[in-house]
Structures are given as structure tokens and as C-alpha cells.
Image (tube, rainbow, N blue to C red):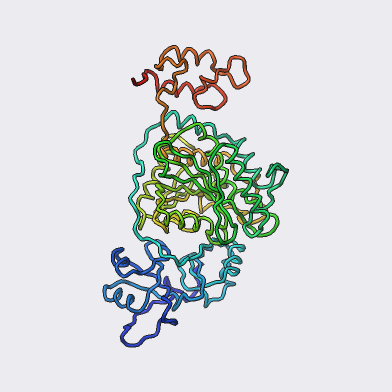
């Protein structure tokens, strides 16, 4: 997909500032550059604004004096544009077979490596590329940190029967129904009225308003604290639901997905991209209602993703400015397509500036093994930055992207045929289980002191086992159903409840 005549860097320049070179087209506006192998402390010392990262490279703005100092220190700098004044830039990943950037003016392409481009473009031009199948990310000019706060990500995990019981509640029938609801196959209720979600495109103002209201009402019915997070840009608002920790209410983990979809017309089912990720977030919220955690959990649905990550960017920026303590972010984007029956999932992390994100990726991979899920994880440490996790990377937050195998790409991507009927439901369901177990582990659920003490005797013992056995096999509505024996709140008394009781057998109440 490389264009002839382009090198890895479009323009490489070596200049002696004192000689009167005129790389800067505006003396008051910094040039847009790509910086390699610079020590973070040097960038900070020179007060160079970093706009984003691209693998090991920094996209930044520099003035002549700053450039001269970097050059003297042997830092490789590559000019992208002489001035950012009045311009907009996007990072483009073009995985379309037709190479949609061939129709884009060559003078607007500032960088090319493989299928990754940096372009100078208007919002309309960038939107056109998105409509043609490219992934786009807007470069924003507020300075970003280049250091992150270390986060302790669990690395050694053991099988936990409670977690196993929770993820076992994820079933294909519910997954299919929820995805059908979001992608317009079913009539749903919004604001007390019947409605079919035919599109969730952020440029379809009324449709995205209804889609976000649907998400809001879903979380609200579960009893969560829910709010709309408003911003300026396509989509206008995100949906944020929070489960407050009784221990560390101001410490958070985030499980998220973008709610908006493509194409940009009045019909855009977006079943895989990205009703699939949203269903994982929503079902996680539903299944975790009965449990408390050592860290608060945010369930987030973003909009404006397809136009350049507007929703997640604004949220991450405001979270960083407010000093919000976000421990980890799990972003889910397209988790339901597996035509080749791999079943491979990709987990994208950033080893260059956020090594803890690699730890988070390994945790998710280990969870797949520990809970014997029918998935095979592939960790990409130089991960793609074309989904909402990249917004959090920019602000130094540990984040990963969970996505289907890029070598087995959805045939119906960004078309009106991205429908639930074409998804691989067993793969989708297993991916959801892996995501749910990961967020439970990172948020660190609080084990009730006497989970399994059915008779409230202060001890988990043989009498509790007897009571559970008398109700074993019963479901809600059956005469012998005992809600106290339904330890995982699943509505049925089964082997999962027995496993939980066994794990706590012998525990005695503390004085």
C-alpha cells in the first residue's frame, strides 16, 4: 500500500538555524514535527508541546530555538508542516483494499509508513476517508504528558470460582438479543416509546441522541449513577455510568466502547463495529450489579469515534485536567467477527511510553488461559492507536484495545450489511467473558465475609451445604427455590453456587 516515491518520513531536514533557514512559515506558530529518540526530561525542559504519540515517535510543535537545541543533542527531527496555524491534522490507518488515500491530494499527505498516514485535512475530508473505510484520529493541540504514573496491574492470577460463576452467566442468547437491539434488528423502548435503532452515526443528530438515551436508560434501570458527558464535536455526548467503590470511591477502572457507527447514511446497523463492544460494556454492568469492588468502575459509551475519537478524547482530557485517578482502561472495539475460526483476539498495548499497558494485555491473555476460554490472545506491544484507548494513552493512562484479528477482517465493515446475522456468536461470547473477567480482576471485587453462610450461623459449614443441596437445580419460580442459596444471583441454584460455597467452606465470622 506504499505510494511510490515516499520514504518512511516524507521530509527529513537538517538545517542550521543561524544560517537564516525559513522552515517556519509563521514566526508565532510552531512547526509540526515528528521527534525520535528524545529523552522525556529534555522535551519537558524545553517545554515542547507534545500533541500525540505514534509508536516510539512524538508528534509535537517546535519553534526555531527548540529545534536548534534538539539538533545539537543529536535528536532526529522530521518536519511535517511549517506551521500549525489554522490547520487540522489527522492520523489515518487505511486498511481498505482500494487504498482510499489514492484519491486524496498528495500534497496533503505529510507522512507515510505502511498503511499509516498523517494528513493535513479538513474535517469533511477526514470524514470522507472514514466513509471509505479508513480509521481516523484527529491530532489535537493541547499539550499531552509524555510520562505516566506507574500503575500496579495484577500479573499472577489464580482460578477464582466467583469470577468463573459470573462469566458463566454470559450466554449466546442474551448476547445475540442485546446486539440485535442495538443494531436495529429489534424494536426497543426509548423514553417509553417504541423505536428501532437504524443508525448510530454521530452525524445523524437525532439518531445518535436516541442511541445515547437508550444507553443512559439501560444503565439507569440497573441502579447506576449515570450522566451524559457533553463535548463539542460529532456525537455531542457520551454516556457514563459509575459503580462507586465503598473502599476507594475516587479510584477508577474503565470498560468502554464506542457507540457510534458507519456508514453515514440513515441505515447503519454497525453490529460488529461497534454494537459488539457496547454489548460487552452493558452486559458487564448488568452482571456486576450485586458485587462491590475495591476500585470504582466506569462503564462508558463514546460517540464521535468514527470522526476522530472526539468523545473519548474530550473525556480523557478532562479527566487528566481534573487529576482523575484512572488505574486502567479496557477498550472494546469490534469483538464479534471470526470467519477463519481462529479464534484469535488482538490486544493492543504501548510498550514505549506505557509499559504497564503491556502488563494489562498479559493479564487479559492469562485470564483466557486460567478460565479455559476458547480464545487465543495475540499481544501487539506496538499497538494501533485508532480507537478510543489512544485518547487515554495520550494522557498517560494505562489502556489496551481488545479487538478481533486484523488478519481476519470483517467483510461488511462500514457497510449497511454489518449485521448481527453475520457474527460469530460463540467467539463473541467468549470474547465478552474474557473482557468481563479482566475488569473484575483489575477492579478487585470484594469477597463478602461469609459468602456461602446461607443459614446466617456465622460459619460456612455442612448445614449450608445441606440447604443448598435441597434447592439444587431449582430456578426462580420453582417451589424449592431458595434465594439465599443463589450465591451468584443468577436466578438458578447450580454448580456455580456449589463452587462458591466450596471456596468459602470453613470460613467463620470475625469477632
x then y, percent, for residue 135: 54, 61
Would you identify the image quadrant in which residue 161 lies? top left
Residue 223 horizontal/vertical position (percent): 56, 37
Q: Nearer the viewer, residue 288 or 229?
A: 229
Q: Residue at x 47, y 49 (%)?
A: 346
* Residue 156 versus residue 96 in the image, above or below: above
Q: Can residue 368 be seen at all in this image of the molecule? A: no
Quadrant in the picture for the C terminus = top left
**Image x and y of residue 35, in percent:** 36, 69
Residue lying at the far left in this picture: please name it.
73
User: In terms of depth relative to the viewer, which is nearer, 238 or 332?
Assistant: 238
**How many labels sit on residues?**
0
Does residue 8 sit above or below 313 in this rendering? below
Q: Position of residue 131 (x, y in %)?
A: 62, 62
Q: Residue furthest bottom?
A: 20
Q: Residue furthest right?
A: 194
Q: Is residue 474 visible?
A: yes
Q: Is 187 rendered above or below residue 479?
A: below
Amino acid at each position: 500500500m506504499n505510494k511510490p516515491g515516499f520514504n518512511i518520513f516524507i521530509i527529513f531536514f537538517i538545517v542550521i538555524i543561524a544560517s537564516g533557514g525559513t522552515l517556519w512559515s509563521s514566526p508565532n506558530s510552531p512547526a509540526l514535527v515528528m521527534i525520535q529518540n528524545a529523552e522525556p526530561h529534555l522535551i519537558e525542559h524545553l517545554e515542547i508541546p507534545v500533541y500525540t504519540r505514534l509508536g516510539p515517535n512524538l508528534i509535537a510543535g517546535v519553534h526555531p530555538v527548540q529545534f536548534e537545541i534538539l539538533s545539537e543533542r543529536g535528536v532526529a527531527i522530521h518536519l511535517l508542516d511549517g506551521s500549525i496555524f489554522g490547520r487540522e491534522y489527522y492520523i489515518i490507518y487505511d486498511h481498505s483494499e482500494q487504498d482510499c488515500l489514492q484519491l486524496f491530494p498528495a500534497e496533503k499527505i505529510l507522512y507515510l509508513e505502511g498503511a499509516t498516514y498523517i494528513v493535513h485535512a479538513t474535517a469533511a475530508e477526514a470524514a470522507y476517508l472514514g466513509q471509505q473505510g479508513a480509521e481516523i484520529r484527529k491530532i489535537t493541540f493541547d499539550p499531552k504528558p509524555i510520562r505516566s504514573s506507574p500503575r500496579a496491574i495484577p500479573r499472577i492470577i489464580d482460578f477464582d470460582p466467583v469470577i468463573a460463576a459470573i462469566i458463566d452467566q454470559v450466554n449466546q442468547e442474551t448476547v445475540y438479543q442485546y446486539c440485535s437491539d442495538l443494531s436495529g434488528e429489534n424494536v426497543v423502548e426509548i423514553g417509553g416509546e417504541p423505536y428501532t435503532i437504524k443508525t448510530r452515526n454521530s452525524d445523524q443528530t437525532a439518531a445518535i441522541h436516541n442511541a445515547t438515551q437508550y444507553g443512559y436508560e439501560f444503565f439507569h434501570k440497573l441502579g447506576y449513577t449515570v450522566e451524559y458527558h457533553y463535548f463539542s464535536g460529532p456525537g455531542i455526548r457520551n454516556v457514563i455510568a459509575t459503580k462507586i467503590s465503598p473502599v476507594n470511591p475516587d479510584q477508577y477502572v474503565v470498560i468502554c466502547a464506542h457507540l457510534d457507527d458507519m456508514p453515514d447514511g440513515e441505515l447503519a446497523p454497525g453490529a460488529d463495529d461497534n454494537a459488539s463492544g457496547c454489548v460487552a460494556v452493558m452486559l458487564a454492568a448488568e452482571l456486576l450489579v450485586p458485587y462491590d469492588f475495591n476500585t470504582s468502575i466506569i462503564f462508558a459509551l463514546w460517540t464521535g469515534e468514527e470522526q476522530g475519537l472526539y468523545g473519548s478524547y474530550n473525556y480523557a482530557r478532562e479527566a487528566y485536567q481534573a487529576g482523575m485517578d484512572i488505574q486502567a482502561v479496557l477498550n472494546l472495539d469490534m469483538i464479534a467477527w471470526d470467519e477463519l475460526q481462529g479464534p484469535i483476539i488482538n490486544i493492543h498495548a504501548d510498550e514505549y511510553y506505557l509499559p504497564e499497558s503491556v502488563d494489562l494485555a498479559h493479564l487479559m491473555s492469562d485470564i483466557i488461559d486460567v478460565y479455559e476460554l476458547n480464545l487465543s490472545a495475540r499481544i501487539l506491544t506496538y499497538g494501533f492507536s485508532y480507537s478510543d484507548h489512544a485518547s487515554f494513552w495520550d494522557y498517560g493512562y494505562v489502556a489496551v484495545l481488545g479487538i478481533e484479528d486484523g488478519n481476519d477482517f470483517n467483510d461488511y465493515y462500514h457497510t449497511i450489511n454489518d449485521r448481527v446475522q453475520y457474527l460469530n456468536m460463540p467467539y463473541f461470547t467468549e470474547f465478552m467473558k474474557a473482557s468481563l473477567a479482566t475488569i473484575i480482576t483489575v477492579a478487585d471485587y470484594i469477597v463478602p465475609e461469609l459468602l456461602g453462610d446461607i443459614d446466617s450461623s456465622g460459619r460456612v459449614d455442612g448445614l449450608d451445604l445441606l440447604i443448598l443441596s435441597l434447592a439444587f437445580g431449582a430456578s426462580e419460580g420453582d417451589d424449592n427455590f431458595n434465594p439465599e442459596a443463589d450465591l451468584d444471583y443468577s436466578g438458578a441454584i447450580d454448580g456455580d453456587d456449589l463452587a462458591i460455597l466450596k471456596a468459602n467452606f470453613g470460613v467463620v465470622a470475625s469477632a
